Amino acid sequence: MIDAADRLALVTSAACLIHCLALPLLFAALPILSHVLYLPESFHLWMVAVAVPTSAYALLKGRRRHLSSTIVFGVVGLSLLVIGTTIAGETRYEVPITVVGAVILSIAHVLNWRRRHGKA
């Protein structure tokens, strides 16, 4: 079950990165897509609503097998995602904060998976 949670959390982080980085570039290149692929602002809140419990579950369940640094990465990444989505939402800081948070959270999940499987 922890592997599934780590995978879901990684997919969520990847979706966040695609949304924050690739979609604006795609919309700039092909403006008509902005009318077809509209995502409401609440999309960010839904992504965080999935990321927080999923990540917390996977990282806390895996904590017995690895160092606390994985938990620290996870807390920092999740905190940045929440800050980027709520406090910095719709400002010029939203994307950088959210992207950094997603990357750090992804690192935490990769470390979690690797340490639980004896690969790090």
Image (cartoon, grey):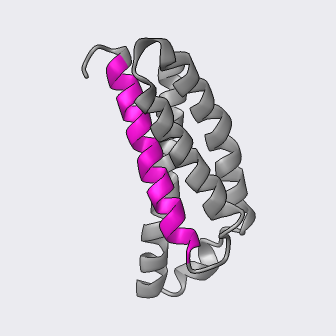
Query: Which quadrant holds the C terminus?
Result: top left
* Res 1 visible: no
Find residue 69 and report its horizontal and vertical position in percent: 41, 31
Q: Is residue 41 above or below residue 101?
A: below
The image quadrant that residue 92 belongs to is bottom right
Q: Is residue 42 above or below residue 30?
A: above
Question: In percent of the image, x 59 and y 54: which residue is there?
Answer: 81
Q: How many marks?
A: 0
Secondary structure mostly seen in magenta is helix
Outermost residue, right direction?
42
Query: Which quadrant holds the N terminus?
Result: top right
Instruction: Please tell me which residue lies in front, 81 or 4.
Output: 81
Q: Give yes or no for residue 3 being in the magenta stretch.
A: no
The magenta region covers: 93-115
Q: Give yes or no for residue 97 being in the magenta stretch.
A: yes
Question: In percent of the image, x 65 and y 54: which residue is there?
Answer: 82
Instruction: Please tell me which residue lies in front, 2 or 74.
Output: 74
Find residue 74 and report its horizontal and vertical position in percent: 51, 38
Find residue 73 and report its horizontal and vertical position in percent: 46, 40
Question: In percent of the image, x 54 and y 85: which residue is there?
Answer: 32
* Res 3 visible: yes
Find residue 33 and report its horizontal and vertical position in percent: 54, 79
Q: Relative to residue 3, is residue 111 drawn left or right? A: left
Q: Is residue 30 above or below residue 54?
A: below
Q: Relative to residue 120, is residue 60 drawn left or right? A: right
Q: Relative to residue 5, is residue 18 drawn left or right? A: left
